[in-house]
């Protein structure tokens, strides 16, 4: 995979989200934040995550959707169970994935991070193909940006988030160039 000059992955499906804005002037992408997501909770497929990130989620489809349909969120990339990658926001822009967050004393992690959602839950293992795709994306990002760390949403918002969860195997993340990765 290659990150183009426009901040889009060459091998990812593109579905543009309206939920982004510009990064602050001078912001440098130094952090990759890993999340997990499934919609409805615990169910995979169906395109509901893309609909959430594009503000087209049907609140009548599932009772849980009625609670979140008005939420305006996005991630840069989603990795589905089969390893397919969909990009919603250019890496050059700020996706709305981290919320209230801090990393190494710096707040507002959306300003200097890339958000990658991995289709899954806190309650079961991720697939081999998801790890393959994730590592390819991380390597592509490292080739373009001075990535200093890869962490979980739980590392930057520990009071309110648990993802990517206890079944995420940090040992399966390739660690080149001394990038900081939480211990397994």
Image (spheres, helix red, strand yellow):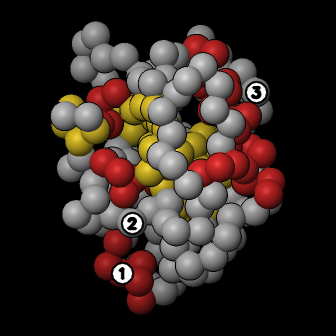
In the picture, the disc for residue 66 is 1
Q: Are marks 2 and 3 in contact (CB under 8 Å)?
A: no
Q: Are marks 1 and 2 in contact (CB under 8 Å)?
A: no
Q: Is residue 21 above or below residue 33?
A: above
Q: Which residue is mark 2?
A: 162
Q: Position of residue 173 (x, y in %)?
A: 65, 43
Q: Earlier in the sequence, mark 2 or mark 3?
A: 3
What residue is rendered at 25% in x and 20% in y?
A: 24
Q: Is residue 125 above or below residue 17?
A: below
| Left or right of residue 74: residue 21 | left
Disc 1 packing (10 Å; few <14; some 14–19; many ≥20): few
Can you say which quadrant of the picture contains the C terminus? bottom right
Q: Which residue is mark 3?
A: 1
Disc 2 to disc 3, C-alpha distance: 29 Å
Q: Nearer the viewer, mark 1 or mark 3?
A: 3
Element under disc 1: helix
Disc 1 to disc 3, C-alpha distance: 36 Å
Q: Position of residue 30 (x, y in %)?
A: 42, 24
Disc 1 to disc 2, C-alpha distance: 22 Å
What residue is rendered at 26% in x and 34% in y?
A: 104
What residue is rendered at 47% in x and 74% in y?
A: 58
Q: Is residue 110 above or below residue 141?
A: below
Q: Position of residue 179 (x, y in %)?
A: 52, 27
| Left or right of residue 85: residue 184 | left
Element under disc 2: loop
Q: Position of residue 176 (x, y in %)?
A: 65, 25
What residue is rendered at 48% in x and 16% in y?
A: 146
């Amino acid at each position: 995979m290659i990150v183009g000059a426009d901040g889009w992955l060459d091998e990812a499906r593109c579905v543009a989200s309206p939920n982004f804005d510009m990064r602050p002037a001078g912001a440098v992408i130094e952090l990759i934040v890993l999340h997990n997501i499934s919609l409805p909770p615990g169910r995979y497929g169906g395109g509901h995550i893309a609909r959430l990130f594009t503000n087209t989620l049907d609140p009548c489809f599932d009772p849980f959707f009625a609670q979140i349909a008005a939420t305006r969120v996005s991630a840069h990339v989603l990795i589905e169970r089969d390893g397919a990658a969909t990009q919603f926001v250019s890496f050059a822009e700020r996706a709305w994935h981290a919320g209230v967050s801090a990393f190494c004393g710096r707040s507002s992690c959306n300003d200097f991070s890339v958000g990658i959602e991995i289709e899954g839950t806190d309650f079961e293992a991720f697939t081999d193909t998801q790890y393959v795709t994730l590592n390819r994306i991380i390597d592509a990002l490292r080739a373009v940006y001075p990535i200093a760390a890869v962490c979980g949403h739980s590392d930057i918002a520990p009071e309110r988030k648990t993802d990517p969860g206890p079944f995420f195997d940090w040992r399966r993340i390739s660690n080149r160039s001394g990038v900081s990765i939480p211990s397994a």
